Image: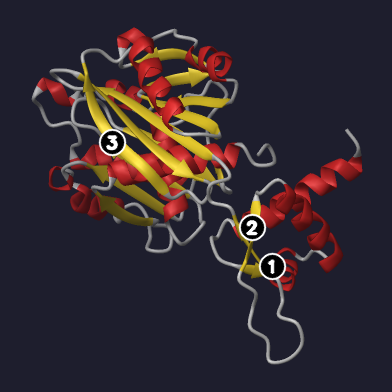
Amino acid sequence: MSCTFEVKKLNRQLIRDVMRGGHSYTKADIGRETGLSLATCGTILNEMLQTKEVLEAARQKSSGGRPAVCYQYNKDYYRMIGLYADNGSACGHLGYVVYNALEEVIEEGRENVREVNVESIIQKLDLLMDSYENVRGISIGIPGIVSQGQIKSCDIESLELAGLEEMLRKRYQIYVSVGNDMNYITYGAYDRQESKEDLSVLYFPQNHYAGCGSIVNGELLYGSGQMAGEISYLYRAEGIPRPDSGKAVEPAWFLAKLLIDLTAFLNPAKILLISHDPGKIPWEEAVSICRKTLTEEEMPVIEISSEFYQNYIHGLAALTLHEQRYRI
């Protein structure tokens, strides 16, 4: 592949990144934001106009001379579908969200299904694909370990060892990513925050061990076997039972140990705790225990939130778009 082609692709992505802010921009605005010359911006914008990736907007008012042409990103240029699966005590659940090119939610919902399996996932995706044109990507979050598109282990037994990613790519002929739910939750939380400093997320589900995800230098930490953040092994090593055993799962001393370990190994600027019922997490006591070991300068910002679904559905779109940079 030629160097010129690669440079042009990078320049196009720079312009795309700016314009996906959703505002109207002149050529001068885009040049200033990207550092590209007006000639380069003009050439790429003309090409993007031809494919309808960008549209002409109302011209800017001028105090004199001809008003400058304004451009805006076409929010209908493509669609993205996110799907997440989990099993409840009585039935399975499939949640879904459809985004436009500006990451605006077009439709979202959550449905009960008799069983979460490959067939129920395909059935839901078929309906969504029939309802929306120009879908460019599908992301699916599952509570399990996924390596090279293969589900290695999963809390939903019917999905274990399923080659779901390759199956869906062949069926729909578009980009498909099947990943661990913590990766989407973590990236969603990272993308929603104003700061882009390193972040670790601890999520405390109601019936399973906690999960962990981390962003280092703007990128998710996956590990060589996609097992980074599988802290259930730490619970087992300490003999701490799962939540469904009816016993306490996050003793303050153990939560403090997790926070200190994350600080020692990754030194994140912030650790976000997510729980459907934050009142059950002894995080303030855990922070007090941490202060006996860590100085104020060493302590990351520690916050707790109940915004599980907000981070999850945002991450399904944001991470997929991040992975697809330069492919759209």
Of badges 2 and 1, the one in the foreground is: 2
Label 3: which residue? 109
Residue at 72% across / 63% down in the picture? 34
Image check: 59 left or right of 64?
left
Front-most of residues 264 and 113: 113
Distance between the Cα atoms at labels 1 and 3? 37 Å
Residue 191 is situated, as x and y percent measured from the top left of the image, at 47, 51
- How crowded is the residue under tag 3: few (<14 C-alpha within 10 Å), some, or many (20+)? few
Distance between the Cα atoms at labels 3 and 2? 30 Å
User: Could you tell which of marks 2 and 1 lies nearer the N-terminus?
Assistant: 1
- How crowded is the residue under tag 2: few (<14 C-alpha within 10 Å), some, or many (20+)? some
Quadrant of res 29? bottom right
Label 2: which residue? 55
User: Could you tell which of marks 3 and 2 lies nearer the N-terminus?
Assistant: 2
Secondary structure of the residue carrying tag 3 is strand
Is residue 264 something one can see in this rendering?
yes
Label 1: which residue? 33
For residue 223, above or below residue 14: above
For residue 121, above or below residue 182: above
Of badges 1 and 3, the one in the foreground is: 3
Q: Which amino acid does label 1 sit on?
A: Glu
Residue 124 is situated, as x and y percent measured from the top left of the image, at 36, 22
Residue at 80% across / 62% down in the picture? 42
